[in-house]
Structure formats: C-alpha cells, structure tokens
Image (cartoon, rainbow, N blue to C red):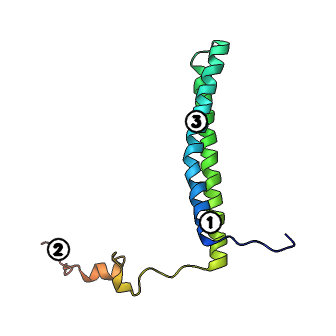
Amino acid sequence: MNGKERKRPPKVEEWRGVGSLGTIGLEVVLSIAFGYFGGRWLDGKFGTEPYLAILGFCFGIGAAVRAFQRALREMKAQAEREEREQGNPLPRYDAPDERKDEPPITKADDEGTNNDDGKGGA
C-alpha cells in the first residue's frame, strides 16, 4: 500500500480481538476430538483397540495446549502494541482513599498494634 498503513476503526479492532479469543475454545475442543476419534478410527483399522485412541487423545491435548500458548502469545503482543501506540490507561480511581482494598500491612504497622509490653505471661 505504498508504505501507508490503513488504520481500522476502534470497533473493528475490538470485535477482531473478541473473535480471536472466541475461537480458542473451539480450537481446543476440535483438536482433542479430532485426535481421539482419529485414534479410534485407526484402532478399528489395525485392531489395536484402546491404544491409538489414547495416543490420539494425548496428541489432541498437546495440540490444544499449543493453540492456547499461541493465543496467549498473540494477546501479549497485541497488548504491547496497543500500549506502545496509546500508552498506559489512567487509573480507574481518583484518589488512593477511594480504593476498596486496603494497603498491605507493614512491619511497623504490625509492631504498633501489638499490646505486648515485652514481659512474659498474659
């Protein structure tokens, strides 16, 4: 395209991401099913009843794991690309006191709430 990149509208990019994430479940299920039923078919041809079905199932799981890893790699690359282009988003809260979770307890805070005066006993 003569060195010019065509920029897609934001809605198209969002739906493209949803579509690629939606297909990972289908890809996982189909790879496992294809491996298992392919192994069963080969078992029927060669008379090796459960062995090739189990082997096909294991290969299907391996293919599903690879598909999941590939999708994860693509999502990370897309997130890094968006971060480079748009920067980090602003936080969803305005001030630290608006946060719902409490800050972590430090050792100084923990020592301040201790009522033990150093003497043994209760």
User: As drawn, which residue projects farthest toward the left?
Assistant: 122
Asked if residue 16 lies left or right of residue 114, the reply is right
Under circle 3, the secondary element is helix
Task: Where is residue 63? Give x, y as percent.
Answer: 64, 40
Specify few, some or many for label 1: CA neighbours under 10 Å numbering under 14, 14-19, or 20 or more: few
User: As drawn, which residue projects farthest toward the bottom?
Assistant: 95
Specify few, some or many for label 2: CA neighbours under 10 Å numbering under 14, 14-19, or 20 or more: few
Q: Which of marks 1 and 2 is nearer the N terminus?
A: 1
Residue type marked 3: Ile
Residue shown at 66%/76% (left/top)?
Answer: 84
Closer to the camera in the image, 113 or 93? 93
Q: How far apart are marks 3 and 2 (CA)?
A: 64 Å
Q: Is 9 located above or below residue 15 in the figure?
A: below
Specify few, some or many for label 3: CA neighbours under 10 Å numbering under 14, 14-19, or 20 or more: many
Label pair 1/2, CB-CB below 8 angstroms:
no
From the image, which quarter does the N terminus lie in?
bottom right
User: As drawn, which residue projects farthest toward the right?
Assistant: 2
Task: Where is residue 8? Give x, y as percent.
Answer: 68, 70
Under circle 1, the secondary element is helix
Residue type marked 2: Gly
- According to the picture, the residue beneath numbered tag 3 turns out to be 32
Closer to the camera in the image, 35 or 13? 13
Task: Where is residue 16? Give x, y as percent.
Answer: 62, 60
Under circle 2, the secondary element is loop
Residue shown at 62%/79% (left/top)?
Answer: 86
- Quadrant in the picture for residue 81: bottom right
Label for residue 12?
Answer: 1
Judge depth for marks 3 and 2 and give the one in front: 3
- According to the picture, the residue beneath numbered tag 2 turns out to be 120
Q: Which of marks 3 and 2 is nearer the N terminus?
A: 3
